[in-house]
Image (cartoon, rainbow, N blue to C red):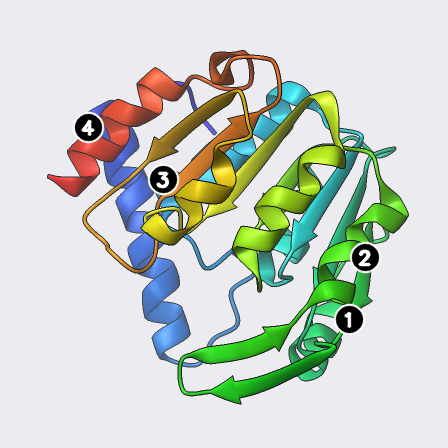
Amino acid sequence: MTKNNYTPAGLGNMFFTGSRTKMLRSFGKEVNRPYMKEREIEIFKEILIKNKPARVLEYGCGYSSIYYPQFLPETSRWFSVEHNQEWGEYVKKRISAKTTLSLVPPDNATYKDDGYEGDFTSYVEKGKEFAPFDLILVDGMAREVCIDYVYDLLTDDGLLIVHDANRPCYREAMKKYKHVNILEDYRKTAGGMAFLTKSNPITDYFDIERHKKIWKTASF
């Protein structure tokens, strides 16, 4: 990641990378990059490289579990919790030695057209087994419950990231955190990132003002 990605050349490279990834996937090619906008990936990389978290927890495994651990120190560990057995097994074959992936199916849930509904208590509470964490990513099932639950799993200076934070249904669960910053865009049911801490301001973790400019330009 370069520090000048707010320049036309930097932004152009960001959009080129995202477009190329999307095109390759449309042709059935496997691309080991997270299903996120490039501007979201850039933020995550900056946080990992700058803060060097020793223990990371992720709810909802995927290409993020494969891609992001490479930016961690060798002694750091990435823990992922996934509810879908088939998808989890697919990812498990591709993760590095830094990563521990736990498959925890719903306790009692029904799958409908728009996703699961039901009890994910075991899935949510699995994170406690590996706590505490310097960084937590909520990007899976039962997000409102996860946001509330992981408050006690974060270190005092830890950072929580919520993906798809454009969804207003997550706001209530965020109120217990001292600092909350949300980067939103034009999407209503997906996208966006929220950054939450128990004590330190978000600016301690990454240059959020620079990324606000990038997001504003990208949305325009």
SS label for mark 3: helix
Image coordinates for residue 147, horizontal then vertical, percent: 58, 45
Identified at 79% across, 61% down, the residue is 101
Q: Amino acid at mark 1?
A: Val
Identified at 80% across, 30% down, the residue is 54
Identified at 71% across, 24% down, the residue is 52
| Disc nearest the viewer among 3 and 2 | 2
Circle 3: is it few (<14), some (14-19), or many (20+) Cα within 10 Å? some
Q: Which residue is mark 3?
A: 39
For residue 5, say whether it is visible: no
Image coordinates for residue 210, horizontal then vertical, percent: 33, 18
Distance from the alpha carbon under mark 3 to that under mark 1: 30 Å
Q: Which residue is mark 4?
A: 8
Identified at 68% across, 72% down, the residue is 83
Disc 3 or 4, which lies upstream in sequence? 4
SS label for mark 4: helix
Q: Which residue is mark 2?
A: 126
Q: Amino acid at mark 4?
A: Pro
Image coordinates for residue 126, horizontal then vertical, percent: 81, 57
Q: Which residue is mark 1?
A: 104
Distance from the alpha carbon under mark 4 to that under mark 1: 44 Å
Q: Please say if 83 is above or below 173.
A: below
Disc 2 or 1, which lies upstream in sequence? 1
Disc 3 or 2, which lies upstream in sequence? 3
Q: Mark 3 near mark 1, Cβ–Cβ under 8 Å?
A: no
Q: To which quarter of the image does residue 122 belong?
A: bottom right
The quarter of the rendered structure image containing the C terminus is: top left
Q: Please say if 93 is above or below 43.
A: below
Disc 3 or 1, which lies upstream in sequence? 3
Q: Mark 4 near mark 1, Cβ–Cβ under 8 Å?
A: no
SS label for mark 2: helix
